[in-house]
Image (cartoon, rainbow, N blue to C red):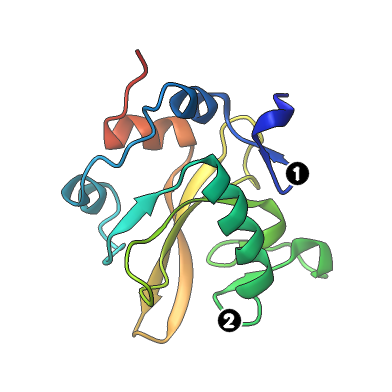
Amino acid sequence: MNDEFVVNGLPLPPLLIELLKQDKWQHPGDEVMRNVIPFLLDPVDLLKFESMRHQSTRFAEVVVRWSFHAISGAKSTVPVELPWLDVDKVVLIAVNKQIGDDVAIALDYRTSIEDPRVVASEWHDNKQHLWSEVTPTFSEFVEKIGIKLT
């Protein structure tokens, strides 16, 4: 494991590490993101590593208080499954461009440590903030948004 690229005790996927190192982790455009995640209605920014670390730490502290359908799996007596997010097993990789939109895309490590699934937040009736799978793996997400390594 590359200890340099760890967020909240979770190692970033090797593909993401390479994309970051090569400065290829770039937003593909709002239209591409809407095509890949049609339920994500607001634009997002892809996060660089330090922002992933900061946002993910802050997220774990804030979302449970604000009822963003997230809970600490370590504190739960039952398994935490979608549409709930386990804040102990998530790294944010994109967040809303505009303050107040409150949307995000995250790596969900409940499925795999090496190639976690990608989930995104979804507003229901402008009241309930749920999480849905975007792709079963991060590598599939990268392929769908068209980012390539050199």
Whole-percent x and y of residue 21? 49, 23
Residue 97 as seen in the image, left or right of residue 7: left
Disc 2 crowd rating (10 Å Cα; few below 14, some 14-19, many 20+) is few
Q: Quadrant of residue 102?
A: bottom left
The residue under the point 56% across, 62% down is 82
Residue type pointed to by label 2: Ser
Residue 3, image x and y in percent?
A: 74, 29
SS state under label 2: loop
The quarter in which the N terminus is drawn is top right
Q: Is residue 121 above or below residue 146?
A: below
Q: Secondary structure at mark 1?
A: loop
Q: Which residue is mark 2?
A: 67
Q: At 31% across and 62% down in the image, what residue appears?
A: 40
What count of labels does the image hold?
Answer: 2
Residue 9 is tagged as 1
- Is the Cβ of the residue at disc 1 closer than 8 Å to that at disc 2? no
Work out whether residue 7 or residue 120 is closer to the camera in this orientation and state it: 7
Give the CA separation, mark 1 to mark 2: 24 Å
Foreground: disc 1 or disc 2: 1
Q: 36 or 12: which is nearer to us? A: 12
Percent across and percent down for residue 119 are 47, 53
Q: Is residue 9 left or right of residue 98?
A: right
Could one spot residue 107 in this view of the protein? no
Residue 87: tell me if it is visible: yes
Q: Residue at x 65, y 76 (%)?
A: 64
